[in-house]
Every structure is written in C-alpha cells, then in structure tokens.
C-alpha cells in the first residue's frame, strides 16, 4: 500500500515544487517506487521532472473529471526514475467544473485506489492556495510534509496551514496529520534563521525533520534543465541533503 503525502504550504515561494521533485528523485534513488502528482496548474513539478507539459495528452485534469484513469494518464520519467501524473493550464478550469459535481473533494482519492499497490510513495505537489485542488490532495493523503524557510513570516503562514489541516482532519479525512516540517533554503550564517529553527524544534519537537536543506545554487539551476537537483548534480550539497531526507522519510514511515 502506497503512503500518500501532500507537500503543502499556503505561503508561496517556499520551495514546495523543489521539495516534491527532489524528494521523489531521492526516494527513487534509494529504491522506492514513486508516483509524483502535480496539482498546480502552472505545471512546474511536471516540467521539473523532465516531462513536457505541453505535449501531455492526458493529465490530472482528466483524472479529476473521471474521463481517464491514473494508469492511463501517468507517464514515466526515464531520467528521474519515477512516474508523473502531470498538469498544465487546463487544470485551472477544473476548479470551476468541479463545483457542480458530486464527491468533488474525493475525486483524486477514488482515482488512486486502483494504483495503490503499485507504489511505495505518492507525492502530491499542491498549489499555494487552499483551493478545490489542494482539498483533493489533502483528502487522499496520509500526511502533509511542510517545507518552510526559517523566517518570521513563515511562522505566521504555518499557523494558517495547521488550522486548515485540523479542519480537513475533523471533517473530511481522519487519517490526515502533519508528518513533519522540512527546513529549506537554510543558511546557518544568518542568526535569525538559526533562531527560528530553534523555535520550530522547541514548539514542534519530533515533527521537525532532522534533515536540513541548505540554500544551494545547483538546486536553483536544475529546473531550467527540466530536472530535479538530485538528478542534475548528484554531488551538490542540496542533492545530497534531499537523498538524506528521502532516507529519513523511509525510516519515518516504518514507524507510522
């Protein structure tokens, strides 16, 4: 049975897509079977996995509207070693079209049942807003991975996200929990970042992942080549940190 995780944060620009594609590549590298689902109409996670969103015949949009199954719509990223259920601009229309339909927040959950046994991990890249798309992701997930920068405003955004997760847990998905907070774009030379990091550990204790992802130029360059940093430059500090994070995730779900 696959463990399904949303990578979510209601604050934009915190590295959700970078985290999703690099964790997927890291997990594939340590021998896990991975499906990466792009729920963001911008399709950045799709492009960052070596898949051209403009050439996709079927996407997650077709799966949500039940005109295609997950197995029909997914593509395998040869370079990255994992499967991709991609997205493109079409997905923006799904918001409006899903308003009228039954079980609209459970569409993705129902679609994933048929491929559950084919994967060890399903990672979902969510848009930054709490939309019907994000809700579909949260309704089918076992947990949420929260990438965050160690800055003051990030703490404020985290409060909103925790409240959202509590509401979804209470009303739609009893399995949903925060799996952990991942400190990303971390620069140990900045005193404020060290202080916020300590605050996180004090407040959230073992919910903070041990792995810290450093600020890294090679990770930032990788998307322009259509690859995760883990594949683009495996020897870079950022790539090595994501492989270590993948190993920590595998260890953590054994205890779940």
Image (cartoon, rainbow, N blue to C red):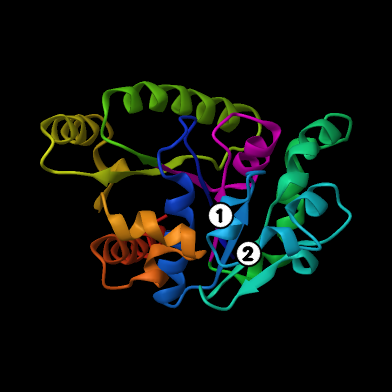
Residue drawn at 16 percent across, 34 percent down: 198
On screen, 136 above or below 191?
below
Q: How dense is the environment of label 2, judged by Cα within 10 Å: few (below 14), some, or many (20 and up)?
A: many
Residue 40, percent across and down? Answer: 63, 44
Residue 126 on the magenta segment: yes
Residue 90, percent across and down? Answer: 78, 46
Q: Label 2 belongs to which residue?
A: 84
Q: Please identify, in this view, whether the residue under mark 1 or under mark 2 is nearer the observer.
A: 1
Residue drawn at 34 percent across, 71 percent down: 233
Residue 240, percent across and down? Answer: 27, 66
Q: How dense is the environment of label 1, judged by Cα within 10 Å: few (below 14), some, or many (20 and up)?
A: many
Residue 8, percent across and down? Answer: 49, 40
Q: Is residue 229 left or right of residue 49?
A: left
* Image quarter (top left, top right, bottom left or bottom right) of the C terminus: bottom left
Are the residues at dot 1 and dot 2 in contact (C-beta closer than 8 Å)?
A: yes
Q: In this picture, which residue range is highlighted in magenta?
A: 121-146
Q: Is residue 143 left or right of residue 112?
A: left
Residue drawn at 26 percent across, 73 percent down: 235
Q: Label 1 belongs to which residue?
A: 45
Give the image quarter of residue 196. top left
Q: Nearer the viewer, residue 91 or 246?
A: 91
Give the image quarter of residue 56. bottom right
Residue 127 numbered mark, or none: none
Element under label 1?
Answer: helix
Residue 91 seen anywhere in this rendered image of the structure: yes
Residue 123 on the magenta segment: yes
Q: Earlier in the sequence, mark 1 or mark 2?
A: 1
Q: Is residue 79 left or right of residue 52?
A: left
């Amino acid at each position: 049975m696959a463990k399904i995780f949303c990578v979510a944060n209601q604050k934009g620009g915190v590295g959700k897509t970078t985290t999703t594609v690099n964790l997927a590549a890291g997990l594939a590298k340590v021998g896990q079977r991975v499906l990466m689902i792009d729920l963001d109409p911008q399709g950045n996670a799709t492009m960052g996995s070596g898949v051209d969103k403009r050439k996709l015949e079927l996407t997650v949009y077709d799966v949500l509207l039940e005109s295609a199954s997950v197995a029909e719509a997914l593509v395998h990223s040869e370079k990255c070693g994992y499967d991709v259920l991609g997205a493109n601009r079409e997905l923006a229309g799904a918001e409006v079209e899903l308003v009228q339909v039954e079980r609209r927040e459970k569409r993705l959950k129902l679609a994933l049942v048929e491929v559950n046994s084919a994967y060890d991990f399903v990672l979902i890249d969510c848009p930054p807003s709490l939309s019907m798309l994000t809700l579909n992701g949260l309704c089918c997930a076992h947990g949420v991975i929260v990438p965050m920068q160690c800055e003051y405003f990030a703490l404020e955004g985290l409060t909103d996200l925790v409240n959202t997760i509590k509401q979804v847990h209470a009303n739609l998905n009893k399995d949903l929990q925060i799996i952990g907070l991942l400190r990303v774009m971390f620069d140990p030379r900045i005193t404020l970042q060290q202080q916020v990091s300590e605050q996180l550990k004090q407040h959230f204790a073992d919910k903070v992942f041990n792995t810290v992802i450093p600020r890294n130029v090679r990770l930032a360059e990788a998307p322009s080549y259509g690859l995760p940093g883990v594949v683009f430059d495996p020897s870079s500090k950022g790539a090595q940190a994501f492989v270590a994070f993948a190993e920590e995730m595998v260890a953590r779900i054994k205890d779940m």
